[in-house]
Amino acid sequence: MIALTMTTDALDENWRRISDRVPHMRLTQLLAIAVPPVAALALVLGVSGALLAAVVVVVAMGGSGGLTYAFLLARYRAWGYREREDDLLVRRGCLIRRVSVVPYGRMQFVDVIAGPFERSFGLATVRLHTAAAATDARIPGLDQAEATRLRDRLAALGEARAAGL
Amino acid sequence: MSVPATDGWVRLHPLSPVLRGVRLVIPAILVTAQATARGGSTGIRLAVFLGLVAFGAVAAMVSWLVTRWRVDGGTLRIETGLVRRDSRQIPLSRLQAVDIVRPLLGRVLGLSELRLRLAGSHHGDARLAYLAEDGAEALRARLLALAHGLAEETPAPPELPLFQLPTPRLLASIALSGLGLTAAALVVVAVVVVTVSPPAAGALLAPIVGFWMTGWRRLNSEFDFAVAEAPDGLRLKGGLLETRAETIPYGRVQAVRITEPLVWRAAGWCRVEVDVAGQGHARRGDQEGVRVTRALMPVGSREQALALVARVMPWPLPASTRPPRRARLKSPLRYHFLAAGFDARSAITQGGRVCRATVVVPLSKVQSIRCVQGPVQRHLRLTTLHLDTAGRNLHAVLRDRDAAEADWMMGELPDLCRAARQR
């Protein structure tokens, strides 16, 4: 039996992980979103004389930012994918755990997407589409070379095993 | 008959612009009424009305002039559009279903609309509006023959009736549905309110009309509903003012759902719906957007339902088992109905809170398998499995299974699905 890891937490050696640059990217994203408003608020408070309030705001936001980062790290560790002979497995999520099985023959097309953050870290997201709208198989934070390899392999396998609706 | 144009291209029926133009009369009246409300002489009103009608007539005429279609080998080609030419090629092997729709005025004029449902079409269904009645039926037989890879001239095969809905039962089922009961309750409330304080009753008018309109729509679409079996697919027919005849080719059914609402269960009734592939992006104002799944049987007994399901999926249904008792903590309202099971051919799941819903999905139609485990489920060692299909809105959910069992299923199901696809 294949342990599909709903009962186990650890990813064994069969699973591939996403790039280890993802935590850096997540940190950058977090800072890009959180720093400007917090800095602005602290500045306003500091200038208007409420120095204590400014310090409290910075510490509180720093603490919640740290918690958020810890959560994002846990999510990063949960991502994994595995190319089997006939299908692709994708697992993700730390609070709500999901495992998707997408047979190669069911793939309609494969997308490689890279947003500005992903691009600046040399990463990309591979997304699989089947005829079912509910299929939710995407793998973010792949090395661009790995994303291209995966896309080409999936496309080739999909063509070889295509099945009608 | 349709007007032949050059080299195999055919125009739509010459009366089509009339039928399309008439649809514009009611909006024209509304606009004119609005102009009247703002004040204005009779002359202006008449001019606005006539202008709108003339515009509609010209638009419908032009649209008819520039639209043509032909069957070319295994594809149907439809060309339309004056400014922006739109040429659609429809590979008939991808055909998911064919409908013949006859609006009331169309029946008077002897015209029908042909709708072709395709998988993954973002532009809605392909339509030929309108064709002569016998021409539409002949074309449907031709398209279905081509879709099944037969010769184009294959005549429409004979039909074997499977199910006929008696009108009294349809009326009773609408009255006893949540819709009918709410409408009745609203009427009672309205009567009480009218006797107590008449001015407040006006507020109730809109919901009452809304509910009665929905009920009327169901009656209009499901009146005299009949299912017949033909070698090229299941034939569904029905309608009071506007009639529809749908054909679902075999092997195109993605999922079947049997629903048993609370009140209906007392009478032993249920409803059967089928789902075919498609993206469900209906055009705005299209009835199709409201009615996404098709009723295979609007109302009938459980035996009739199972007999119909057996026609769509000609193999025995798998046995289902119930989730562990601890699932009651996670799904207290639906635990009493929860059950699921699968075998080599199909998966069956049962759920619902008040209304029991049974979904059957052939494993050969499963697009992807997902298992999801939320924090509460993890604590209770439960997992939910989803079997996604290409259908518009039905897919099987094996809810709150034991985690170890779900792991086992996740190991088994991909192989079973692959075997079912290759069968």
Image: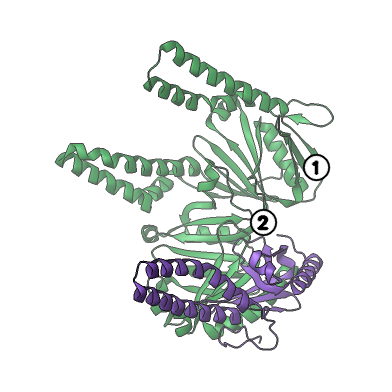
Residue B152: which disc? 1
Identify whether B252 is placed above or below A57: above
**Which sits in the foreground, B372 or B337?**
B372
- Residue that protrudes farthest toward the top in the picture: B43
- Amino acid carrying mark 1 in the image: Glu
Q: Secondary structure at mark 1?
A: loop
Say whether residue A73 is left or right of residue A157: left
Asked if disc 2 and disc 1 are in contact, CB closer than 8 Å, the reply is no
- Residue that protrudes farthest toward the left in the picture: B196
Q: Position of residue B19 (x, y in %)?
A: 58, 26
Residue at the image point whose x is 40% and y is 73% from the top: B336
Q: Position of residue B102 (x, y in %)?
A: 58, 34
Q: Secondary structure at mark 2?
A: loop
- Give the chain coloured purple: A
Q: Position of residue A87 (x, y in %)?
A: 72, 74
**Which sits in the foreground, B405 or B41?**
B41
Label 2 resides on the chain identified as B
Q: How many marks?
A: 2
Residue designated by label 2: B252
Tag nearer the camera, 2 or 1: 2
Q: Position of residue B163 (x, y in %)?
A: 54, 50
- Give the chain coloured green: B
- Determine crowd level at label 2: few under 14, some 14-19, many 20+ residues with C-alpha closer than 10 A: many
Give the quarter of the image for residue B111: top right
**Which sits in the foreground, A97 or B356?**
A97
Residue B317 in view (yes/no): no
Say whether residue A46 is left or right of residue B134: left
Q: How is the image coloured?
A: by chain
- Amino acid carrying mark 2 in the image: Arg
- Determine crowd level at label 1: few under 14, some 14-19, many 20+ residues with C-alpha closer than 10 A: some
